[in-house]
Amino acid sequence: MPQVDEWVAEARQALAADNRLVARGYLRRAAAAAPDRLDIWLDLYEVTELPADRKRCLERITALDPGNVEARSALEEILQKEAEEEEAAAASEAAADAASAPDPTAQADGPPPKAEWMGVRLDISDEMRRQWDEASAAGEPLYCINHEHRETALRCNRCGAPICASCAVRTPVGFRCAECIRAQQSIFFTVRWSDYPIAALIALLLAVPAAAVAGMVGWWFALIISPLAGGLIGAIVHRAIGRRRGRWMWLMVGACMVLGALVVWLATPSALIAVGIHTFTATSAAVGVLRLRGPR
Ligand SMILES: [Zn+2]
Ligand SMILES: [Zn+2]
């Protein structure tokens, strides 16, 4: 495969010029095209800092050369570290669950946020960013952090990682990688699964009497008072779940409001107009309150 050799030669040249990033790009291409060439994987291992890259290199190296004790022990170290991290993550999740006793006011002093909840992705080092910056300043090719063959000029404007067109997510503040978006959303959407049934129960318990009063008093009540009642229900639910935000909270509370009104209408069919207007005004107000406090 002459092309693979060309890439390897390009990589060696780049490496001689101390440009590890370009060398890595060529070596990744070469390794993907010729996955059985031990020399390429060994070279790639030397120039890459990406944890996923390093692991894959070591896996290939030990598969192709089972006698390479160094590679084997490095791989074992990585696997052990991964297992430990998984364990720690599971433990801190369990701790978070244990700490989430139903105290709606205790949001501020809950469990300390996990590092990846702070809105930054942790697998990008300053060193990697510096190399990307240098390469792009020098007009050298960058490769998508998720797709090693895709040359790209796009970069995540938060972490700086090069991303291809299919990995880039357009946001109001520019292109971002999916990891950064997830990291940021994880600090925004703080809701726990247990919050949903609590919110549903409260919304239903409040929606039924609200709709019943509207049905008894009449349509003018539904027009004037129901929006306030709906807003109040939204605020009460929000407070009851410790002001945590959930992506679908508004939808579920809205559904419960409609369900509550439906129950009332079935019980008093003659109040159709008042209950109908109430359903619309109160539900949109409750949904509006929750969407204000959690983004779309
Ligand atoms: Zn990013
Ligand atoms: Zn990509």
Image: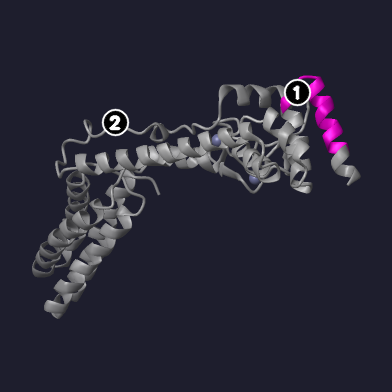
Q: Secondary structure at mark 1?
A: loop
Observer-nearest of 189 and 45: 45
Q: Quadrant of ligand 1?
A: top right
Circle 2: element type: loop
Mark 2 highlights which residue? 112
Instruction: Determine crowd level at label 1: few under 14, some 14-19, many 20+ residues with C-alpha closer than 10 A.
Output: some
Q: Is residue 136 left or right of residue 203?
A: right
Please say whether residue 18 is one of the residues in the magenta stretch.
yes
Please name the residue that numbered disc 1 is placed on.
19
Residue 29 position within the rendered picture, expressed as x and y whole percent measured from the top left: 76, 42
Q: Residue at x 62, y 29 (%)?
A: 49
Residue at far right of view: 2
**Residue 263: quarter of image:** bottom left
The amino acid type of the residue labelled 1 equals Asn
Give residue 109's position: percent from left, percent from top: 21, 31
Identify the amino acid type marked 2: Pro
Residue 172 in the image, given as x and y percentages of width and height:
53, 39
Q: CA distance from mark 2 to mark 1?
A: 40 Å
